[in-house]
Each structure stands twice: as C-alpha cells, then as structure tokens.
Image (cartoon, grey):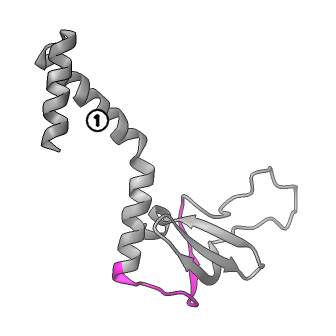
Amino acid sequence: MLGYIISTIIFFSYIGVGFNEALAAGGFTGLILGLASQTVLSNIFGGINILISKPFKIGDRITLATWQYGLIFPTYPPKFWSNDFLIPGFTGEVVNISLLYTSIITDEKLFLKIPNNVVVQ
C-alpha cells in the first residue's frame, strides 16, 4: 500500500501536479466512489448482519412488511367498488441468504430476491 502511495506521489510530481491538488482530487474521487457504492455496501453489511445474528434461517417462514418493499398500494388506480386491498407484506419460506439478497418463495409461489438492507430494516 505504501508503495502505491509513493508511486502516485512520484507520478503526480513528474506531471507537475502539486500535493494539494492531488489530495483534493483523491478526496473528491473517494466521495464519488462512496456515494456510488452506498447501496451495494448497505446490502453487504445487511447480509453480514443477517448471517451473524441469524434472525431466521433457510427453511423458516417469515413475513416481510416494510415501506420500501411490498405491495402496499396497487400501481394502478383502483376501480370503484374493486377488490383491491392492502397487502401488509410478503409471507413465505426463506430459500437462500447471501451477502446481497435474501430469497423467499411466497405463498403465491412467487420467487423474490429481496435486498438485505430492506430485510434488516
């Protein structure tokens, strides 16, 4: 790691870029990469949290109710006197738990891959 830092400093001094400019560019690049990878990192940390704390395991029956995921309201306007109703969440059997997603099969036989940051909330 130290070799990369030294070679980067030598490269920037060779092309005539000052240390302050290189430091600002590195900070800006780190900020952009951090914002771009925020969702992926939250899924990974959520997966690690699920795998370590084990709130459920493969084969367990769970109900997932969250404001981010689920069929809270239909995406189309309901008809007058229709049977559209609120579905409080998804109930099903856990099939797989990975670092990014938790997979469940619902009672309606739908296969869902739900991001771990949503499951942890």
Residue shown at the point (23%, 30%) measured from the top left: 27
Q: Position of residue 117 (x, y in %)?
A: 45, 62
Structural crowding at the residue carrying mark 1, measured as other residues with C-alpha within 10 Å and reported as few (<14), some (14–19) or many (≥20): few
Q: Position of residue 42 (x, y in %)?
A: 39, 57
Between 49 and 21, the one nearer to me in the picture: 21
Residue 64 counted in the magenta span: yes
Residue shown at the point (20%, 37%) measured from the top left: 4
Which secondary structure is most common in the magenta stretch?
A: loop
Q: Quadrant of residue 16?
A: top left
Residue shown at the point (75%, 67%) measured from the top left: 85
What residue is shown with label 1?
A: 30
Between 63 and 93, the one nearer to me in the picture: 93
Q: Residue furthest top?
A: 16
Number of numbered tags placed on the structure image? 1
Q: Note whether 91 is above or below 3 in the view shown.
A: below
Q: Taking the image as drawn, is residue 11 in sight?
A: yes
**Side of 38 where 14 appears, left or right:** left
Q: Quadrant of the C terminus?
A: bottom left
**Side of 110 where 68 appears, left or right:** left
Q: Secondary structure at mark 1?
A: helix
**Side of 19 where 42 appears, left or right:** right
Q: Quadrant of residue 47?
A: bottom left
Q: Taking the image as drawn, is residue 21 in sight?
A: no
Between 75 and 116, the one nearer to me in the picture: 116
Residue 69 counted in the magenta span: no
Residues rendered magenta in the picture? 52-67
